[in-house]
Amino acid sequence: MSWFESFVLGLVQGLTEFLPISSSAHLRLTAAFAGWHDPGAAFTAITQIGTEAAVLIYFRKDIVRIVSTWLRSLTDRSMRGDHDAQMGWLVIVGSIPIGVLGVTFKDQIEGPFRDLRLIATTLIVMGIVLGIADRLAARDEVGGKHRAAKERKTLRELGVKDGLIFGFCQAMALIPGVSRSGATISGGLLMGYTREAAARYSFLLAIPAVLASGVFELKDAGEGHVSWGPTIFATVIAFGVGYAVIAWFMKFITTKSFMPFVIYRVLLGVLLFVLVAAGVLSPHAGESAG
């Protein structure tokens, strides 16, 4: 991998990690469209450490408060009812599904799941799911001619059951094209949570999963055509761009709909199907040398 490739892929990772459009799919597609080798699951997982570092800094006050309260609650029973202590446990509980499924399906994640036809399918299907979830949320927020507006749930109403459902939604993002934020936010909206609550828990829930995945994949970094230097460079680029994107996205979702992302996902998926069917792109483009 050249330094230019690592710069572009780091930029793509930072731009797409927090948007509900799938960063892993875009890394895969960028390489395929450019005629580069597939950067691979290890490169993707490690560069995601950069974007998660952006989450740690952006949500640093929330994270410090949750971690410190959770640690104190381990010895102080009176604090176990505190919302922040409960959030600590809920992040742990919600991380279990992706941890178990990630290890179980590791070979599929690094192989068959990177087929461009599967990515096109997940882009379209999950785009439609996100669109339905967004419409339901909008209907609750504004009400209707014969229907009053409905108050949606906040994170203070999050329990173990919903935390696990969020976790299984996040685990779906092991398949490129699903999108970690897209799946968890869709799940949250369908369960009746506000856009802000679903997005906030989505980002907090991703921290242990992404950091664990990145550390796990460190042993495979530097193998094949991807060397350590470009990987680290791409990770740094992803951090800087990712921080700017997450700050913008958290403001965007408070007043805007997810429909632009829905339309983008569906159009990209359809385009991908057309290019593969026309023979312009191979469904395994770049994999043989990746």
Image (tube, rainbow, N blue to C red):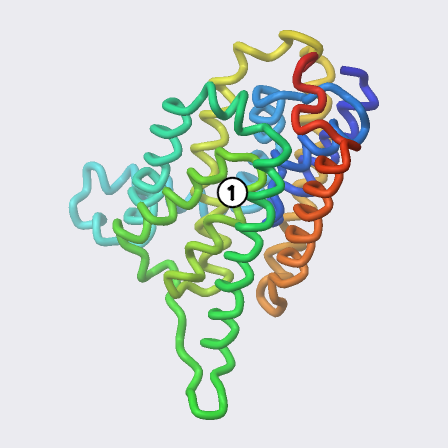
Q: Is residue 184 left or right of residue 221?
A: left
- Which residue is depicted at the point 44% across and 50% down? 201
Q: Position of residue 91 (x, y in %)?
A: 36, 42
- Which residue is depicted at the point 42% across and 54% down? 187
Task: State the quadrant of the N terminus.
Answer: top right
Q: Residue furthest front?
A: 278
Q: Position of residue 23 (x, y in %)?
A: 63, 38
Viewer-side residue, 174 vs 238: 174
SS class, disc 1: helix
Image vertical order of residue 41 relative to residue 142, above or below: above
Viewer-side residue, 123 vs 90: 123
- Which residue is depicted at the point 72% across and 30% down? 10
Q: Quadrant of residue 52?
A: top right
Q: Position of residue 232 (x, y in %)?
A: 68, 19
Image vertical order of residue 113 relative to residue 245, above or below: above
How many numbered marks appear? 1
Q: Quadrant of residue 4?
A: top right
Image vertical order of residue 117 relative to residue 145, above or below: above
Q: Which residue is mark 1?
A: 180
Q: Residue furthest bottom?
A: 146
Please state which amino acid type lies under the numbered disc 1.
Answer: Arg
Q: Is residue 13 left or right of residue 170?
A: right
Viewer-side residue, 4 vs 101: 101
Q: Residues within 10 Å of mark 1 (few under 14, many from 20)?
A: many
Q: Position of residue 199 (x, y in %)?
A: 50, 54
Q: Is residue 93 left or right of residue 263?
A: left
Q: Is residue 64 left or right of residue 87?
A: right
Image vertical order of residue 183 relative to residue 279, above or below: below
Task: State the quadrant of the C terminus.
Answer: top right
- Which residue is depicted at the point 51% across and 35% down? 175
